[in-house]
Amino acid sequence: MNPKSTQPEPSKPSTDQPRPTRTVLLQHTEADGRSHLDWMIDPGGDKERRLVTFRVRDRIDLQGCQGFEAERIGDHRAVYLEYEGELSGGRGAVARVAAGEIRAFSDAAALNAVANFGSGWRKFSGRPVEGARWLFSVLPC
């Protein structure tokens, strides 16, 4: 209560909800012609931040995706949120397949997030199962 008023104080916004950041799904075509998808998640922060990155086989941005396997790979530079084109060192090229907003909650044992690639918010729940291999389930919000 405000001491000068009988009205309750307005509630403050919840601080346990992370601010939305960006996510991107890139098709990485290697120099030998093989390709895979890289899912990158911006954890927020300064310009020097690194993107949490998973290699995936499936189009996780599509509504029909209910779950997928992923391989946790090295974090990538934030420039990949915007970059499309040739990669240095003969590593092939990347092209954006999808981009959107994400609110991620993670710790060493799990990654839980809500993401919107443009067709509605969905919940992504992932956990490591062996080494760098993770399993994710996807549910509508």
Image (spheres, rainbow, N blue to C red):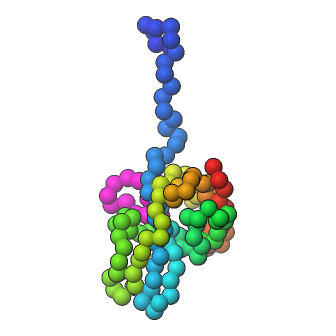
Which of the pair 19/117 is nearer the observer? 117
Horizontal side of residue 89 vs 27, given as left or right: left
Write the residue at 38% across / 68% down.
80
Horizontal side of residue 82 vs 75, given as left or right: left
Which of the pair 17/106 is nearer the observer? 17
Q: Is residue 119 above or below residue 74?
A: above
Q: Is residue 69 above or below residue 126?
A: below
Q: Is residue 78 magenta?
A: no
Residue 36 percent across, percent down from the top left: 52, 79
Q: Is residue 49 magenta?
A: yes
Q: How many marks?
A: 0
Which residues make up the magenta segment? 42-52
Horizontal side of residue 68 vs 4, given as left or right: right
Q: Is residue 8 above or below residue 48?
A: above
Horizontal side of residue 108 vs 21, given as left or right: right
Viewer can see residue 73: no
Which of the pair 23/46 is nearer the observer? 23
Viewer can see residue 89: yes
User: Which image quarter: residue 112?
Assistant: bottom right
Residue extending farthest to the front is 119
Write the residue at 46% across / 46% down.
19
Examine the residues drawn in magenta and state their main secondary structure: loop
Residue 76 percent across, percent down from the top left: 41, 69
Write the residue at 48% across / 66% down.
98
Write the residue at 45% across / 92% down.
32
Q: Is residue 116 above or below residue 133?
A: above
